[in-house]
Amino acid sequence: MNNSAPAAPETPAKNMHFIREIIAEDNRSGKYGGKVVTRFPPEPNGYLHIGHAKAICLDFGMALENNGVCHLRMDDTNPVKEDVEYTDSIKEDVRWLGFDWGPHYYHASDYFEQMYELACGLIRDGKAYVCELSSEEWKDYRGIPTEPGKESPFRNRSPEENLDLFQRMRAGEFPDGAKVLRAKIDMASPNLHLRDPVIYRILHTPHPHAGDKWCIYPMYDYAHPIEDAIEQITHSMCTLEFEVHRPLYDWVIQNCRLFPSQQIEFARLALTYTVMSKRKLLELVQQGLVNGWDDPRMPTLSGLRRRGVPPTAIREFCERVGITKYESLTDVALLEHCIRDDLNKTARRAMAVLDPLRVVIENAGEIPTAIRGINNPEDPAAGEREIPFGAELFIEREDFALVPPPKYFRLSPGKAVRLRNAGFLTCTGVEQDAAGNVTAVRGRFDPMDAPIKVKATIHWVPAHAATPVEVRLYDRLFNVPEPDADKNVDFKTHLNPNSLQVVQALVEPSLLAVQPGDRFQFERIGYFYAEPDSRPGAPVFNRTVTLKDSWKSGA
RNA sequence: UGCCCGAUGGUGUAACGGUAGCACAGCAGACUCUGGAUCUGUUUGUCUAGGUUCAAAUCCUAGUCGGGCAACCA
């Protein structure tokens, strides 16, 4: 059995973060007999985003690096919030990221019977009791952080009575909220989670996976350590907010006498110019501010996928971000760098003109009918393609300036540029409309070996063989680095009104033959992804990310 | 005003008692059939105050600042 992902490459230089060190130390000491078993335990109540990718890469990555296995487990202990609808997207996203859980796909709800038995064991040991305080009443008993709580009047019932009550809770004799099962720990603990936490509640709700078998459901703090222990998880990684829950995790392991899984907390990912909370992402979807969970502007994995981001770039990004206990805010520029770095090596080049300006070549008798274009200068194996040429072309409007600003290297009257893959174009004149707008550029063509020196090369498409296609130019969803920094200001006020611009671009003929999911670099513009729902012969391209532009016209 | 966790350039991270390094971003230059890529150089950093030590980012104490914890959510 092999848990390794076929697409996951062995990255040589890895950062020795604290979790790698804990695992290395456990392997040295033989704590788990050299075994490493991890798990990714999403709650099936929403879509995975790039923050989850960090956890997925960690969970699967640590297993992969140590010849271990990583389980995919739906943490479905709350039927009122969860739905099978999400399990498929979760599996798809994890697989797309490049990871394989092999046969190790589980549901927490499959352990409900064992959890119940273990709870009965706790009751018999006098370590759990049925409490009839309402959640309102409990607030008084629990106390506040600075003061100890009071013991529940039900705290000292006999194990027999507790067992009977708990069995009747399971049998459905009591309505929702009437009773709970509590762990009997310490009402004076400075850690609120140890003040007799609820471990079972009554919920007369059928379960999406377990069906209508249960009307009592275990709480996370009780269920999670049991899930881990049953699967013999050695290293159970979770985010920082569970740090204060760890004593309870250990309490359950110890008092139920289970496999000694250990919980290790790390900081979740935060990215500039986006929001990561499920609630806020849902708000964007529900209010129609984006086109669904997989809108290419969303930080969801399905959104990033549809934007054209390669999974390899996300994995590289997660590795570069590192693992610490410091709650950092990562610059989205790092993600964009990882995407460009990946696509630069792999994406075929093509030419597309987003904002066309007509060019008329005057010496039409001296031009070729087609030229050869290099498919990827970073990868000779990508070969070449033929691009039709003609006496009439389109170039990018911003590649021509009637009155060039200082340091402008592109086309202007009397000046020359290189036409990518083709030759030189010297501007001999312009055509203007009544308002003075340039409607066409007239020029002279010279072959590549002509003794002409230029400082710029521009892209073009042949007028007779160019086709208009829809291109969606995506930009950052928000226009401030921390949209949700201020609790008093609605994060949606920072939405970038120009996060999506749709244009009709003119593209070279080879682009009409694309398959949905193909990735390209439109030379000098950016990386583009052929929309999955493009119709045959009518491709739609999504801009994944722009090229870096070191020429700043404004500066 | 309780408990837990954290703090290294603009950002993310390394250094595990012995020269504060890497990456991203920025800036400058070289090169180039993409103002891309590549290469080179470069600006900026150990939260504060004490202590231990020949030597502290690292160990100790106190403080400051930030985050988390009072769901029958996960």
Image (tube, grey):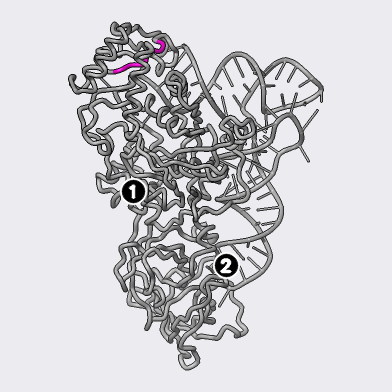
Tag 1 and tag 2 share a subunit: yes
Q: Amino acid at mark 1?
A: Ser
* Above or below: residue A55 compared with residue A1: above
* Above or below: residue A374 compared with residue A121: below
| Residue A80 location, quadrant | top left
Q: Amino acid at mark 2?
A: Glu
Which mark is first along the chain, 2 or 1? 1
Q: State left or right for residue A199 relative to residue A454.
A: left
Q: Disc 2 marks which residue?
A: A378
* Above or below: residue A246 compared with residue A43: above
Q: Disc 1 marks which residue?
A: A89
Residue at coordinates 37% horizontally, 44% vertically from top-left?
Answer: A48
Secondary structure of the residue carrying tag 2 is loop
| Residue A204 location, quadrant | top left
Query: Could you tell me if the residues under marks 1 and 2 are in contact, i.e. CB atoms within 8 Å?
Result: no
In the rendered image, residue A247, in percent from the top left (x then y), is placed at: 47, 20
The subunit carrying tag 1 is: A
Residue at coordinates 44% horizontally, 24% vertically from top-left?
Answer: A249
Residue at coordinates 54% horizontally, 73% vertically from top-left?
Answer: A457
Q: Which residues are magenta?
A: A181-186
Instruction: Rate crowding at label 2 as few (under 14), some (14 to 19) or many (20 or more) other CA atoms within 10 Å.
Output: few
Secondary structure of the residue carrying tag 1 is helix
In the rendered image, residue A375, in percent from the top left (x then y), is placed at: 51, 73
Q: State left or right for residue A511 relative to residue B27.
A: left
Instruction: Rate crowding at label 1 as few (under 14), some (14 to 19) or many (20 or more) other CA atoms within 10 Å.
Output: some
